[in-house]
Every structure is written in C-alpha cells, then in structure tokens.
Amino acid sequence: AKHLLGIEPLRPEAITTILDLAETYVDLNRSDTKRSNALSGLTQINMFFENSTRTQASFELAGKRLGAVVMNMSMATSSVKKGETLIDTALTLNAMHPDLLVVRHPQSGAVDLLSQKVNCAVLNAGDGRHEHPTQALLDALTIRRAKGRLHRLNVAICGDIAHSRVARSNILLLGKMENRVRLIGPPTLMPEAIGEFGVEVYQDMEEGLRDVDVVMMLRLQKERMDGGFIPSEREYYHRYGLDAAKLALAKDDAIVMHPGPMNRGVEIDGEIADDINRSVIQDQVEMGVAVRMAAMELLARNLHAEPA
Ligand code: CP
C-alpha cells in the first residue's frame, strides 16, 4: 500500500507483518543505541491540526530513530490561521518533497482527501471519529505481548464509543483477527449503525465485563459532542468508571488498557490505571513508538519499490 489511512483496507496478514516488524523495534528501543537507518535520507513532516501528546511525540521519535529528517509543523502558528485550506497547506508542503506525511485532523475523511493530492506516503494519525490506525496497531501489539496471542480473546471496549476513532479502528482490527468484541456504554454514546460492526452491545458494565480478557477504557470526547448530551462526570463514573469492584468481574488475568489522554476519576480509577499488575497503559505508549517505526518503514519500502 502507498498510505496507511485506516485499518479497514488491511488484510490480517498485513497487520501481522506490521506487528512482527514492530517487535524488532521494541528491542531496538530498549537497547542503548535506539538507532536504525531504515528512513535515512527521507523527510517526514508531521501536521497535527488537533492536539496530541502521545501520537505526535511517538511519530517524531519513531522517524528520528530511523534516521529521517523530521519536521513538526506548528499548525497553531501556520498560515491555516490566515484562512489557508487543508489542501493548499498540503500542496505547499508537497512541493518541498517530503516522503512521509503524518496527519491528524478533526474532520473524518480529511486525511484520505489529502492523500489524493500529494505524491508522498500519508499516515493517518487520527481523523475525526473515523479511524486512528496506528493506535489500533499499538493496542494489538500490546494485547499480543500480554496475552501471547491476538485471536479468540474477549475484548470489552467501554465508554464513549460513538465519538471514538480509537474504538472504530480497534473494532475493525480485533474483528479481522477473530476476536469477540463487546461494546459497553450508555445508549447516548453508542454509534447509530451498531449492527454493521458485528459486536455485542451492553449498557451495563457489570454484565458486559464478565469473563473478558481485555478491558479497554475510553475518555468522554466532549470536543466531538457538538452541543449534544454530555453526562455528569459523577454519575458517569458511578455507572461506567472502571473501579476495583467492576474489574473483579473480568477474568483474573484481564488487562486494563486506555489510549490516553486519561481522565482519572471519570472513566477510570487512578489506582487501577497505575496498577502494574493489571494496567498496560504505559506499555501501550511504548508499543506506539515501535509500531509507528514499523508502519513508516514498510511504507518507505514501497516508496522506493520499482513498479511491477
Ligand atoms: N491516544 C492518542 O491518540 O493520544 P494523543 O491524542 O495524545 O495523541
């Protein structure tokens, strides 16, 4: 493939290829050198039109550890503020001959549109409520390492599913790898066309968490609620916040995940988030660098492949 725009078009074998290469980068990142030349001579531009801590930092580190020239566009001080469109900004940067463009945008479909206008490889770092493919890949690597497999697992994704690109990409990936996905949350935070996902839906945490292997918590994404119903945080924590009593219903060795940013005391109890026997939240961050290294290396290989 030329771009990484979503999980939807990926075949299971392609997912496994990315995860297997990422494993080698986990080892490299734990070594003293932390350095490869896989992207040597290439230019990577990161364009984040929405806030980010984990994704932007890890894409930057990933590119630098692979030897690329990495530039972070500061969108807050760019000419976007003077009315320049997304496409004009992309065409301007395209004229500077980047090889890899990493893009986050608040509108679903914006990254796909941009990819059709440029010559380089485009990686989707999150578009609206549509997809966040590298997040699902890093979650998959975290699960595979913690559970020893990435199939026949019961995974609960809990909370604000409707506004979550993380949930959407994870549902797609986990389904392709033959896992059972349960969505748990209030009806107001469930997507309308839930049937198309092939998942089980629960409104009740006590019911939905029973015997799951993986508990994935999501933040209330108020920035995408468009003036709609926003639940009270106190009430939400009571019903849907992950605390010790609710987690006790999952399997004894169930892992707890969260893509971040986390709101402690809203969707998750702080002590559970910090419990290294259950929580793999920091592992997810670590896997994020390795997965982004692998994804960029594989796209860069295609960049230089001779047409068949
Ligand atoms: N998980 C995630 O996308 O985090 P950031 O918004 O901080 O990049």
Image: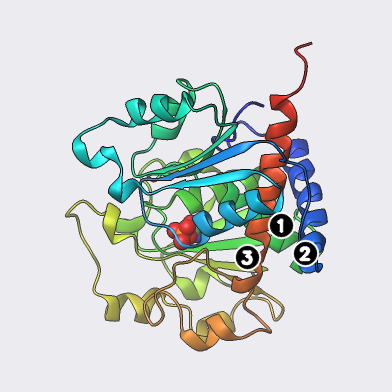
Q: Mark 3 points at which residue?
A: 284
Which of the labelled discs sits on residue 141, or is there none? 1
Amino acid at circle 3: Gln
Could you tell me which quadrant the C terminus lies in? top right
286 or 96, which lies in front? 96
Q: Position of residue 78 (x, y in %)?
A: 31, 43
* Residue in the picture at 20% in, 34% down: 83
Contact, mark 2 vs mark 1 (Cβ under 8 Å): yes
Amino acid at circle 1: Leu
200 or 269, which lies in front? 269
Vertical placement of residue 18 versus 32, above or below: above
What's the distance in space between the residues labelled 2 and 1, CA to CA?
6 Å
* Residue in the picture at 33% in, 32% down: 86
* Residue in the picture at 77% in, 42% down: 38
Please identify the quarter of the rendering in which residue 307 is found.
Answer: top right
Is residue 274 visible from the viewing direction of this image?
Answer: yes
Instruction: Determine whether the residue tagged by mark 1 lies in a helix, strand or loop.
Output: helix
Q: Mark 2 points at which residue?
A: 145
Judge the density around disc 1: few (<14), some (14-19), many (≥20) Cα neighbours within 10 Å. many
Instruction: Determine whether the residue tagged by mark 2 lies in a helix, strand or loop.
Output: helix
Amino acid at circle 2: Arg
64 or 170, which lies in front? 64
